[in-house]
Image (tube, grey):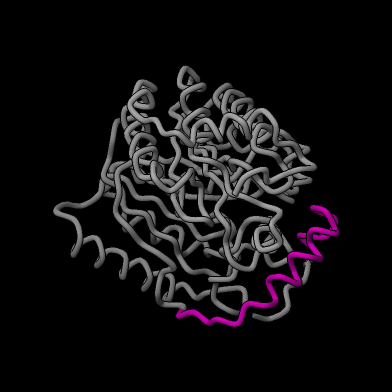
Amino acid sequence: MSKPSPEVYEQGKGMDAHNKAMREIRSRKDETYDPREPTRVWIDEDNTPDGVYQSLTIILNTGGCRWARAGGCTMCGYVAESVEGGSVAHEDLMAQVDVCLEHEAENADEESGLIKIYTSGSFLDEREVPAETRQAIAETFEDRDRIVVESLPDFVDREKIEDFTEQGLETDIAIGLETATDRVRRDCVNKYFEFSEFERAAEHAEAADAGIKAYLLMKPPFLSEPEAIADMKRSIRRCADVDGCHTVSMNPTNVQRHTMVEDLYHDGGYRPPWLWSVADVLESTSDADAIVVSDPVGHGSDRGAHNCGECDDKVQNAIKDFDLRQDPAVFEQVSCECELTWELVTERETGYNQPLSR
């Protein structure tokens, strides 16, 4: 890929050392991508304030997150899958939407009530998705029930959101907050904004009659397992207390290509979180005033959240069951001998001896 570099928007944000390291890591990428093909598309089920919906998830292939091109988040490799050059034309983005609609028609018995649109950056950043495209997408899905679009808080404002709410769509803005702890977000994730900016974005969403879905990151680099668990429990409760934030999605870190996390992983300095940790957080925060869900990507693999290998699928199924039912009792149905190892890790792992177990 072309050598990433900071622009005026990015200067003075994040940690210089992290940004420098991430730019070097990202420069190793040499794949190219078709601007008329989405990065990914799939059909699933999601829990919402209006109940469980069949969902169509679309990851548009844009020119990539502008923050990632300056260096960006230590765990995020999505910019490496973006189209070269920093932008994609309106016609190409709409061609990607057509591909996703064809996928839905071929793989689902009915249209999905929930549409989720991501760009591996910020859908509301008009450098990634022009206003013309945003408005066309709103019109394309005006007959659906609900839509989720992802954005950094910088780009969240009432007028952009109203492109969707004025179509009669229940609209949610998904924000990659990662943690409610500013120090962890800055030093471990290398995200530049503070929790107060998340709260401001929630106010803008509420003014447009939209809701907020907070995305949190379970176990960013440089946190031990017990520190990561404690941070998630605090963060979920703090997000749930923000007006308009009705859903919190906790994403366990997975080892993506062209990231600082991958370098640490190969050097023996990082292990993705245990699935037991994910279950523990969900069970402990089930009384929070929000829908709390998790979808461990790559569960059971060395690069994703995992236990011993024997019980991974069972725990993953319990997590999925919890997502839909919000009943912590589901975790009473799974057990494994490796839980004893996990308990030892949560008691003894510290920042200077991690990972205590692979």
Image quarter for residue 80?
A: bottom right
Q: Is residue 80 left or right of residue 61?
A: right
Q: Is residue 203 above or below residue 353?
A: above
Most extreme residue toward the left, as rendered? 109
- Segment colored magenta: 8-34
What residue is drawn where x is 34% and y is 50%? Answer: 115
Q: Is residue 6 left or right of residue 102?
A: right
Q: Is residue 336 left or right of residue 261?
A: left
Most extreme residue toward the top, as rendered? 287
Q: Quadrant of the N terminus?
A: bottom right
Measured as percent of width and height from the top left, residue 169 is found at: 35, 42
What residue is drawn where x is 58% and y is 25%? Answer: 242
Image quarter for residue 350?
A: top right
Measured as percent of width and height from the top left, residue 286 is found at: 45, 21
Q: Is residue 90 above or below residue 59?
A: below
Q: Is residue 300 above or below residue 62?
A: above
Measured as percent of width and height from the top left, residue 117 is found at: 43, 54
Q: Is residue 190 magenta?
A: no
What residue is drawn where x is 65% and y is 58%? Answer: 265
Q: Is residue 100 left or right of residue 260?
A: left
Q: Is residue 27 magenta?
A: yes
Measured as percent of width and height from the top left, residue 294 is found at: 45, 39
What residue is drawn where x is 80% and y is 42%? Answer: 352
Q: Nearer the viewer, residue 105 or 235?
A: 235
Q: Nearer the viewer, residue 350 or 62?
A: 350
| Residue 208 shows in this picture | no
Image quarter for residue 4?
A: bottom right
